Image: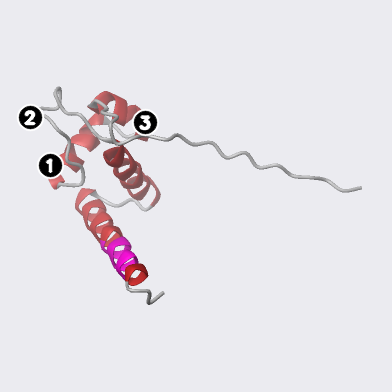
Amino acid sequence: MTQTQITWITGSVVEEEVHMSIVEISQATRAPEDLIMSWVSEGVLSPAGSSPEDWRFSGESLKRAKTAAHLTHDLELNTPGVALALDLLDEISRLRNQLVREKIV
């Protein structure tokens, strides 16, 4: 007798045109608003708007915030550590894209 195992994967497509408030991004990342504010002050996130009440985060910011939340919770990194890790991940991505463009990989 053969058993088939099915794994369901769920996800959300967030367009760049989507703009989320600090409350919405906090809920989406399960990170407290004060942590979101510290990420903004450290340069991890760059929302549009001048104050937390006016901040609007893009779809790219949501992706970055989710990664920051994972780094914070899973690896217990502090805010400067998260900023450094994200900068390094961005650099790795940039270098990989460069290798692909130059057909080295």
Within the image, what quadrant is residue 46 found in? top left
- What percent of the width, then of the height, locates residue 38? 17, 40
Residue 7 in the figure: left or right of residue 27 = right
CA gap, disc 3 to disc 1? 20 Å
Kindly identify the amino acid type of the residue bearing the numbered disc 1: Ser
Q: State the extent of the magenta-drawn residues as a range.
A: 91-98
Residue depicted at 31% across the width and 46% down the height: 68
Q: Earlier in the sequence, mark 2 or mark 3?
A: 3
| In the depicted structure, whether residue 25 falls above or below residue 45 | above
Q: Earlier in the sequence, mark 2 or mark 1?
A: 1
- What percent of the width, then of the height, locates residue 16? 29, 36
Screen quadrant of the C terminus: bottom left
* Residue matched to label 3: 28
SS for tag 2? loop
- What percent of the width, then of the height, locates residue 8? 62, 38
Asked whether 65 falls inside the magenta stretch, the response is: no
- Do tag 2 and tag 1 residues touch (Cβ < 8 Å)? no
Within the image, what quadrant is residue 89 found in? bottom left
| Label placed on residue 41 | 1
Residue depicted at 23% across the width and 36% down the height: 36
* Residue matched to label 2: 50
Nearer to us of marks 2 and 1 is 2
Give 49 or 27, whichever is nearer the viewer.
49
Kindly identify the amino acid type of the residue bearing the numbered disc 2: Ser
Q: Is the magenta region chiefly helix, strand or loop?
A: helix
| Label placed on residue 21 | none
| In the depicted structure, whether residue 78 falls above or below residue 8 | below
